[in-house]
Image: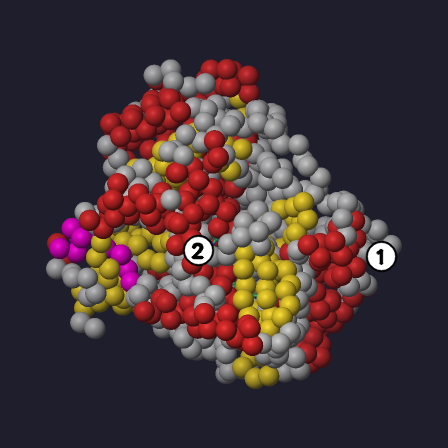
């Protein structure tokens, strides 16, 4: 148990380490490759030193950074003080990805795939012309609905990709959300009318994390705010089959059976209702459907919940009572990906139940509770300069099957299915490694092989690039200007990516240049008669600032949105918090928030397989970066976690190699034997198992969890159900 206690805040011997700032710095510094005496020495000796502001591209957080260059070469990156997500700190990935511009794994020129699968360089002009001709062919034969783009929501990417597709007449624009947070955001939306919320950490007395780890899936500001709450004595409960690295801030670890969080939460709701511990005033004034919910939740007693999720009924009762005592200064945290972002058949419903518990606690909008905040509204720009694109006539492929999916993101697996049934024939990927991360790679490859045209815009030869006909190299983030990034919350901001170094490889282009080139080649160049600077300036004018002002400061605070504590306006069709939803009923599901089981129940001798982030890597993209790869290898971070009692039973020792198998795949990996995992569960970090021979450090290192997952879509919203699998392990000789 030593390992576990060493990590938990309740162990007094660790208390000094847990001072928020110290812990934050320790977490954030993992993988840092700057700030040494050697650097200081060189800096003294060096010539021209300049600073520029930009936004990290290490993950969706897009933290603000300040880059220092020496003689035109990148020297250090630091977190921007005024940016609400970095608050002066970059995480290890922020520092590690700063190597990207100079990385030996970069794409330096456009590439075209030959019949035999090999790639050869092609000029930009030829690549654009050939892609344009193929697009025209698809348009003539199958119409615009046969074209699609999948992009990771980045400032320029989300604008240019949508405009490009819409200009061609297609509405098929998708994000990575079906493999991230689509279920959770769609569920929160059904209950509250907003797609997400945050916990008011400065004032909270108790927070319950359902499989969200601030200590692993890092955003610097989140780590800082949690550290602050922990230092003020807040009770911090981690519900996770694994004692994750948020443990340093936690008071309680509740190990749970994977995919059954919904039962624990319904058990808590049952206690709150049955013992009359809920907020009557909130429920009466601000909700619809409570009587139906209360009648249904009566079945979900703590004893029933224990039977499903394997958390003792007493623990469930105690948690419910403690939450009620702390209410309204407490909340179930909204989570992000792992437990109910996209993982299980019940993920959408789990998100609704999370919201229902917060409603019973009356914590919506309250000090220390669950806050729904607003985002800046960007106004219309001059249509004479930025011509409006006609709205595509056909709906996005996949929307009809999944009416509950959040409208902004779409269900990217519709693209995979569309390639298989021929409805999608031309696919573009921008800043997306769909093949490796959004569903089983073999299924993506099979589907994309059927398409007439696949184009990937990337900085390296990703697995998705390898499955493409054309690969277009973007310059890396610190080499380019992008459209403004607007940030919501209690306060509103706008920040900007600006080039802080010159392009290292002349044959790379920025997002806007690539899309304008594509648009011209496809015959829709008339919709792009402006530069990215002109559009940025026009957008910024609509929120009362300018390109010069944001360039100068790196980030600008916008007009105060006037956030106030108090029950928020729920933007649902009923204008109330919804314990029942007509839209869910229309989709053929139970309208009343309730129970849905997980799909795959491991049999005797089988394990649940769960995944999660590591502080130094992002998804699939950072594994080939020299500094970050070196850390993984030094600490053998690719290992599969196994509970000590399971290992003992199977005769497996720490460091032994096992073969992991599911219905879909098998592969070999070393084992980390640990006390920090619930028996019956295996944990695989999600950054490994690259198969691209161009990524020489990453290829063949560790396993990719997605290889093991059957292709099946969450019935409610079309998420990838990334943990609906049962696996076996057996010891093998290395
Ligand atoms: N195996 C696996 N699958 C996952 C996850 C995981 O951790 N592991 N995480 C899940 C989650 S939470 C999410 S949000 C999604 C994320 O899915 P994605 O947003 O697709 O993220 P990555 O898998 O990191 O792939 C990003 C791709 O963008 C490329 N790239 C990096 N920088 C640039 C740039 O500046 N320009 C361009 N054009 N390309 C760039 C990278 O080389 C990489 O190929 O994946 C989900 N699926
Ligand atoms: N280091 C790093 N940080 C990141 C990212 C990254 O790639 N790397 N990506 C960013 C993005 S896009 C995202 S979506 C977030 C993701 O942030 P998180 O959702 O916090 O990420 P994960 O590490 O995938 O999952 C958190 C925890 O969920 C646990 N878990 C797995 N299955 C279950 C389950 O069934 N029930 C419960 N209760 N727990 C479970 C895992 O053990 C893990 O400890 O991170 C963001 N920050
Ligand atoms: S959390 Fe880390 S990787 Fe993500 S944007 Fe911020 S600094 Fe970059
Ligand atoms: Mo994500």
Residue mark closest to the camera, 2 vs 1? 2
Q: Earlier in the sequence, mark 2 or mark 1?
A: 2
Residue occupying image coordinates x 39% and y 38%: 231
Residue 278 in sight: yes
User: From the viewer's perspective, is residue 604 above or below residue 329?
Assistant: below
Residue 584, x across and y down, in percent: 52, 33
Q: Which residue is mark 2?
A: 28
Q: Which residue is mark 1?
A: 385
Q: Which region shows up in magenta?
A: 639-648
Residue 642 lies in the magenta stretch: yes
The quadrant the C terminus occupies is bottom left
Residue, far right: 384
Q: Nearer the viewer, residue 563 or 452?
A: 563
Classify residue 273 as left or right of residue 49: left
Residue 129, x across and y down, in percent: 71, 77
| Snapshot quadrant of residue 563 | top right
Residue 542 lies in the magenta stretch: no
């Amino acid at each position: 148990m030593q390992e576990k206690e060493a990590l938990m805040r309740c162990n007094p011997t660790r208390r000094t380490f847990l001072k928020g700032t110290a812990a934050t710095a320790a977490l954030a510094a993992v993988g840092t490759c700057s700030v040494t005496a050697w650097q200081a020495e060189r800096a003294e000796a060096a010539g021209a030193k300049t600073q520029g502001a930009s936004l990290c591209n290490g993950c969706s957080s897009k933290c603000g950074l300040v880059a220092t260059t020496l003689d035109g070469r990148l020297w250090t990156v630091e977190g921007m003080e005024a940016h609400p997500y970095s608050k002066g700190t970059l995480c290890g990935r922020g520092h590690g990805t700063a190597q990207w511009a100079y990385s030996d794994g970069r794409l330096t020129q456009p590439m075209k795939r030959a019949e035999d699968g090999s790639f050869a360089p092609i000029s930009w002009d030829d690549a654009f012309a050939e892609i344009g001709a193929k697009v025209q062919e698809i348009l003539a034969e199958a119409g615009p609905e046969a074209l699609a783009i999948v992009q990771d929501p980045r400032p320029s990417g989300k604008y240019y990709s949508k405009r490009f597709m819409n200009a061609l007449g297609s509405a098929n624009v998708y994000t990575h959300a079906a493999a991230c947070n689509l279920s959770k955001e769609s569920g929160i939306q059904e209950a509250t009318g907003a797609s997400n919320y945050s916990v008011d950490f400065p004032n909270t007395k108790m927070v319950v994390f359902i499989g969200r780890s601030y200590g692993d899936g890092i955003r610097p500001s989140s780590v800082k705010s949690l550290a602050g709450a922990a230092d003020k004595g807040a009770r911090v409960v981690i519900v996770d089959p694994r004692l994750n690295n948020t443990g340093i801030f936690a008071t309680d670890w509740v190990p749970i059976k994977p995919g059954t969080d919904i039962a624990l939460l319904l058990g808590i709701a049952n206690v709150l209702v049955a013992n009359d511990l809920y907020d009557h005033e909130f429920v009466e004034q601000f909700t619809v459907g409570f009587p139906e919910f209360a009648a249904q939740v009566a079945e979900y007693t703590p004893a029933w919940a224990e039977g499903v999720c394997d958390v003792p009924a007493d623990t469930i009762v105690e948690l419910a009572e403690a939450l009620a005592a702390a209410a309204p200064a407490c909340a179930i945290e909204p989570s992000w990906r792992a437990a109910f972002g996209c993982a299980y058949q019940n993920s959408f419903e789990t998100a609704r139940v999370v919201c229902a518990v917060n409603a019973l606690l009356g914590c919506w909008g309250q000090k220390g509770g669950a806050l729904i905040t607003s985002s800046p509204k960007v106004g219309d720009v001059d249509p004479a300069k930025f011509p409006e694109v006609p709205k595509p006539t056909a709906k996005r492929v996949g929307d009809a099957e999944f009416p509950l999916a959040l409208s902004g993101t779409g269900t990217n697996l519709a693209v995979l299915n569309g390639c298989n049934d021929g409805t999608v024939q031309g696919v573009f990927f921008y800043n997306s490694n769909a093949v490796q991360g959004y569903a089983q790679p073999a299924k993506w490859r099979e589907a994309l092989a059927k398409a007439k045209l696949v184009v990937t815009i990337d900085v390296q030869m990703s697995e998705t690039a390898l499955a493409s006909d054309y690969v277009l190299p973007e310059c890396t983030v610190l080499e380019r200007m992008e459209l403004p990034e607007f940030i919501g919350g209690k306060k509103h901001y706008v920040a900007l990516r600006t080039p802080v170094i010159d392009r290292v490889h002349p044959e790379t282009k920025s997002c806007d240049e690539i899309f304008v080139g594509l648009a011209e080649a496809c015959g829709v160049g008339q919709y792009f008669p402006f530069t990215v600077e002109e559009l940025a300036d026009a957008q910024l004018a609509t929120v009362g600032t300018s390109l010069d002002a944001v360039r100068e400061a790196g980030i600008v605070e916008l007009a105060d949105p006037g956030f106030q504590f108090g029950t928020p306006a729920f933007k649902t069709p009923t204008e109330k918090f919804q314990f029942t939803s007509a839209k869910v009923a229309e989709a053929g599901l139970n309208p009343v928030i309730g129970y849905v089981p997980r799909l795959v129940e491991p049999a005797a001798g089988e394990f649940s397989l769960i995944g999660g982030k590591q502080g130094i890597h992002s998804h699939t993209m950072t594994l080939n970066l020299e500094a970050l790869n070196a850390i993984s290898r030094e600490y053998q971070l690719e290992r599969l976690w196994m509970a000590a009692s399971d290992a003992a039973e199977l005769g497996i020792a720490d460091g032994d190699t096992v073969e992991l198998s599911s219905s879909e795949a098998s592969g070999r990996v070393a084992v980390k034997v640990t006390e920090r995992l619930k028996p019956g569960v295996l944990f695989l970090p999600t950054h490994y198992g690259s198969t691209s021979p161009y990524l020489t450090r990453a290829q063949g290192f560790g396993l990719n969890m997605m290889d093991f997952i059957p292709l099946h879509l969450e019935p409610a919203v079309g998420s990838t159900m990334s943990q609906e699998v049962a696996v076996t392990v057996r010891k093998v000789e290395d």
